Image (spheres, rainbow, N blue to C red):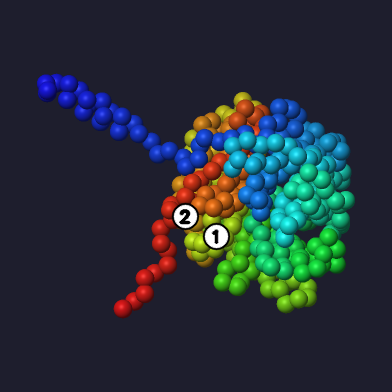
Amino acid sequence: MSVAPLIALLVILASVLAHAQAKPLAQDYRIVFHNPDPERYVEGPGLVRLDNGSLLAVVPVVPREEWSKERRATQSRTHILRSSDGGQSWAQVSELPYYSAAPWVHGSALFLFANKGGTKVRNDDLLLLKSTDVGKTWSEPVTLFEGHFWNCHTGMVQKADQLYWATDDLALGKLRGPRVIAGDLSGDPMNPKAWRLSEPVPFPGVPEMMTNPQFDKLSSQYLEPNVIEVRGKLRVLMTVKPKRQSTAGLAAVLDFEDKGGPIELKFTQFHPMPGGQLKFCILYDEKSKLFWATANLVVDGQGVFDWFREGEKRGNVRYASGLGGNDRRFLMLQYSVDGLNWFQAGCVAQAGKISQSFMYARPVIDGDDLAIIARSSIHAPNQHDADHATFHRVKNFRSLALKLTPEPEE
């Protein structure tokens, strides 16, 4: 063989390797739902695995901000879809008149927390519905609590006879804070007397030393609580948006105990969490003894580059304040042994443009895989007002984790 062709081959190979990039774990998505209406958008979706192995998705579609106040009470819709082939294809089985919804399974029944679109405040009441035919038909809603509540499908703790979740109390306005929901499942979950609601914990504010003084005039908030249980301790972890996400990767930690009476929820601390500046979702995997979370990482939180300033001028980027903390392109998967310190497993999916996104994900364990639904801007007006719900499958997800527990000492 001549040396020249071999050298040419090596040059080509070296060029390919030099330009090789890491690949996301589940970039090839399937469409769960597409919303073509430019005046509405896909809100935070939910996902559960049913006992028969099928997957059930919950996809709220609501009016965009320009039309929200006048339309959200009457034109918000939650679409219920099911897949019997592992997420490859989806069929709608029902539709409900709600702004947001989070599904869960107990026994042979499917349940749905739901929030209505409100008139004076964006959302009204916490409702509960039940289905005994895997989502085709639903009971009349039961009002568990009246007020102004909202959350999308975040982490829940569910035991044989107890369920813990948390919701935002929007009645507090700029100080919106979490309230823990505790349900006694030993009887009839549809009985409002089976449920308790903690008092809210208003947003305490982020210490000045944790943010850049340059962005002092921007607002901060916390929202979208997850509930987890760490070695018997119940905790709430929340998204924190310091100065419009100019400080990224920060979560809030709150703690509570359930002694059977009123639940006292207390703010504990702020703690670093990759992707803590945008909605994240945590679940616990009994097999790996690890927490797993989907979250979004940002690449330029304080606007070193002009990508988001230019995007806002074009009109296809929203809620950025000229900064990059609201970057929703990189949907990541991470894992933790204590629910506080997180290791990166990889990127689930990556959007190419800053006007696009894979965000507000909900992971579900499906055998050796993670089934994930995401709120996604593919051809949407901007990175926030999504036009799709997409499905992603991370195969053999446990193989992505390092062993975090120490070996025994001699």
1 or 2: tag closer to the N-terminus? 1
Residue at left 65%, top 34%? 388
Q: Secondary structure at mark 2?
A: helix
Residue at 43%, 53% (x, y): give it. 399
Q: CA distance from mark 1 to mark 2?
A: 9 Å
The residue lying at 43 percent from left, 52 percent from top is: 400
The amino acid beneath tag 2 is Arg
Disc assigned to residue 398 = 2
Whether residue 218 is visible to the viewer of this picture, yes or no, is: no
In front of the other: 371 or 118? 371
Could you tell me if the residues under marks 1 and 2 are in contact, i.e. CB atoms within 8 Å?
A: yes
Image check: 308 left or right of 227? left
* Image location of residue 282, percent across then percent down: 59, 56
Res 40 seen here = yes
The x and y percentages for residue 94 are: 78, 40
From this view, report whether residue 258 is shown above or below residue 270.
below
- Image quarter where the C terminus lies is bottom left
Examine the image and state in which quarter residue 393 appears.
Answer: top right
Residue marked by disc 1? 285
